[in-house]
Amino acid sequence: MFRGNLNPNISYFVGGEFGNNGFTRVRGGYQPGLIDGHVTFSYLPGARVELGLIRAPSAEGAMRGFMTYDFVINSTVINQLMNQPMLNSAYNTKDTAAGYLFPGTEKLGVNGYRYPGVMVFDWFRNGPWEFSYGAMLGMYGTVAAGNQSNEPMEAVRLQEAYILGGKGPFRSDVQGGIWYQHAVPRLAGQNFDMNRYGVDLTYRQGYMHPWARLLRFQYIRGNGWIDAPAAFSKAADLKQAALYQTQLYPDISNKAWGYMVEGGVFLTKNIEVNLRYDYYNRLPNNPAQNRIFKTYAVGLQYHFTPLTKLMAGYYFRTLDVPHPNATSQSVANAVDNVFALQAMIAF
């Protein structure tokens, strides 16, 4: 990622993704891509204008930069509701009782919460109080996979903060936000409505000193365009395509909701421990497809500098099936815990 200024009123930000991951897995193959690329104009008082490939103003967990992540694996409710895989809109899938099925060759990767478009935003300080807003008009889709960005999306976020001290991404404050995002993705010649909305609250006091602490809460709801990622990678003995293909439920009647609670504390200047619980209730309107994901996460971070650290986490995962059958129960029983380790370095 590269950031800079062309003059006092024009800045730029460009980021590429080269790792072999969900963003770069396009149509079943590896394809590095532009994950961020925009220019910001600051000529108008109270209305900065951002143009390009932009992180949409939405959930707090979807707007944070990589270096402020406390866990290697993001929460399930954020991943599944806000960072869904982009799908080939021209693919003429067969509608079944389980929804639309997409093989890996028709998946276009995730977009990292970013969309091509234009956003107006700014923030206003009055003593310790700060109000900020962002409103975006863009296209739903991914520019990394060609002509798949031709349907509209809108997003807006309002935020109020009480600043306790410091500056930058690790300042001390109490902040709350409310947001709404709407898109009209297209599939097999038909447009579908997709709505996401929620609230969040964050408290941070200090950073990289003993007993610096963090508390974060997010609540998200969505209806329309709910996806169910594949339970397994394809293997020869998996007879049902729904086990290794993405399932999509596009109609507006489909619903999902969830929340996340996280806390953290520095034991020393360098060592931080974190706890998180996230809950995601997918398709409660469809008893046969209803799934409830619960994850308890324990994290440990060693900070060398504010932007360079080692992160480790253990994730206790369960999948509940309120109305099980033999197949869904076997999938639920196969869910296991995860250990993840990652280094993050900025220079």
Image (cartoon, helix red, strand yellow):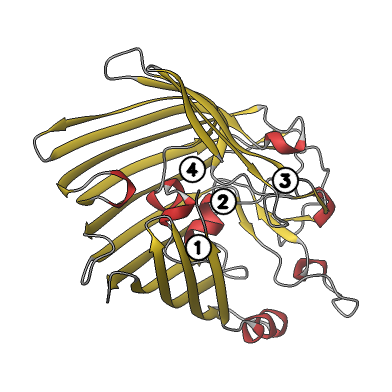
For marks 2 and 4 on the same chain, the one whose residue lies earlier in the sequence: 2
Q: Mark 3 vs mark 2: give the one in front.
A: 2
Q: Looking at numbered disc 4 in the image, what kind of residue is underneath it? A: Asn
Q: Residue furthest top?
A: 43
Q: Secondary structure at mark 4?
A: strand
Crowd rating for badge 3 (residues with CA inside 10 Å; few <14, some 14–19, many 20+): many
Q: Secondary structure at mark 3?
A: loop
Measuring from the top left, give residue 33's x and y in whole percent.
71, 41
Q: Please name the residue that numbered disc 1 is placed on.
A: 74
Q: Please name the residue that numbered disc 4 is placed on.
A: 195
CB under 8 Å between callouts 2 and 4?
A: no
Q: Please name the residue that numbered disc 3 is placed on.
A: 87
Residue at the spot 69% in from the left edge and 54% down from the top edge: 19
Residue at the spot 82% in from the left edge and 67% down from the top edge: 241
Q: Looking at numbered disc 2 in the image, what kind of residue is underneath it? A: Asn
CB under 8 Å between callouts 1 and 2?
A: yes
Instruction: State the residue in front, 99 or 232.
Output: 232
